Amino acid sequence: MTPAFAIVMTGLLAAQAVAPTLAQTSSASHPALRTQTGSAAARPATGDTTTTPPAPAPTTGASPAAHDYRLSAGDKLRVEVYRDQQLSQSVQIRPDGKITLPLLGDVQAAGLTPIALRDRLTTSLKEYITTPVVTVIVVEATPATVFVMGEVKAPGPQPLRGSMTVLEALAMAGGFLDFAKTSDIRVLRKAPAGTETLKFNYKKALKGEGEPIVLRAGDIVVVP
């Protein structure tokens, strides 16, 4: 073996011995690179697929302000029964306070909130439908009024404004006549079970005694 050939072989053997050491050093000095590579290898390939979310389930609903508003004669309603166009109806509350619907016939509506009517219809329809989903919408509400009758200076209908009390209605009616029995005033209110009578003592109310009576549409204030 010539000296030149021996030198070349020695250089090649030295390079082969150093190469693995350099590779190990590079990998150890860059742990982030090793982690990313491993993660990329383990991560499944992703494509441009789009996942469609499931359709939301229907909810039983009622019109806005349904917690407070009381239905009255003349109100126009839309009763929707989910996935049943034959039972879904546009109705108007009759003077007797009722509406007529397929399967159910006459149903008392006046005096109830839209939510209470929805719940009543849902319960009744369970005899015919496994899981009825009912929505009640007030399409058109009649102007809310109350009536003040008896020994007042200006008896008759009064527009119901916000949370109007009996005291405010009496003031709008011009006050009392000379022989009014202000301690025995009655408020007549229509209810699903009939007419409810509330007692009101004007003199005690002026002293701040007792809870104020907030009027509802259709209430009748009677001053004997």
Image (cartoon, rainbow, N blue to C red):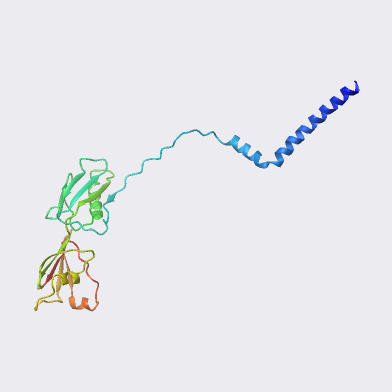
Point out residue 83 in the picture as x, y percentages from the top left corner: 26, 40
Query: Image quarter for residue 50?
Result: top left
Seen at 60% across and 38% down, the residue is: 39
Instruction: Pinpoint residue 112: horizontal percent, then vertical percent.
Output: 21, 57
Residue 33, how many percent across, how many down? 65, 39
Can see residue 14? yes
Query: Vertical placement of 18 versus 57: above or below?
Result: above
Rendered-image quadrant of the N terminus? top right
Q: Quadrant of the C terminus?
A: bottom left
156 or 190, which is in the foreground?
156
Is residue 104 among what the camera can see? no
Query: Where, by quadrant of the figure, is residue 174 drawn?
Result: bottom left
- Rendered residue at 17%/48% (across/down): 91
Side of 181 where 63 appears, left or right: right
Seen in the picture, residue 57 relative to 144 is either above or below; the reply is above
Q: Residue furthest front?
A: 4
- Whether residue 89 is situated above or below residue 96 in the rendered picture: above
| Number of numbered tags placed on the structure image | 0
In the rendered view, tell whether residue 116 sits above or below residue 129. below
148 or 60: nearer the viewer: 148
> Who's the residue at 17% across and 58% down the image?
143
70 relative to 32 in the view: left or right: left
Farthest residue, direction top:
1
